[in-house]
Amino acid sequence: MKPEPIALRPLARRLMLMLGLAALAAFALHQNANAHHGWSSYDSSKLVTLTGTIKSASYDNPHGTLDMTAEGKEWNVILAPPFRMDSRGLERGMLTEGKEVTVEGYQNRRDPQELRAERITVDGKTVELR
């Protein structure tokens, strides 16, 4: 008769609990990300092109942002998530204050100074964001 490994039971329970909590956290983050992106609030029937100067930039999750001056107005531009910008060649250092950029995207229906960017051209390089 083989003795049962008693020490593994508590370890297995802790492992199962940790895996369960990790799965729950991943689900919650996924739901939060889906709720965050209400793309229906943008008018996708009309592509807007802005060329202007970056005032400030964020390369943070859940998505990057730009504040820029274009057409005599201040614009808030919603970019892609950092991992997507990196993988498509838009590096953090490319989005610096004072740099000229061209952004194509869709205007927010409720906030006409906000644009969801589909692509951005910086330093002569065009990057698809969606």
Image (cartoon, rainbow, N blue to C red):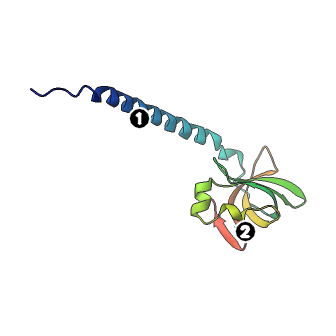
Residue at 28% over, 30% down: 8
Place of residue 19 in the rendered image (x, y in percent of width and height, measured from the top left): 41, 35
Label 2 or label 1, whichever comes before in sequence order: 1
Q: Say which quarter of the image contains residue 46.
A: bottom right
Q: Give above or below for 92 relative to 7.
A: below
Quickly name the residue at label 2: 122
For the residues bearing labels 2 and 1, Cβ distance under 8 angstroms: no
> Residue 80 has which mark?
none
Q: Give above or below for 124 relative to 13.
A: below
**Placement of the C terminus among the 4 image quadrants:** bottom right
Can residue 106 be seen in this snapshot? yes
Residue at 35% over, 27% down: 13
Identity of the residue furthest to the bottom in this view: 124
**Front residue of 31 and 112:** 31
Q: Secondary structure at mark 2?
A: strand
Q: Secondary structure at mark 1?
A: helix
Circle 1: residue type: Leu
Can residue 130 be seen in this snapshot? no
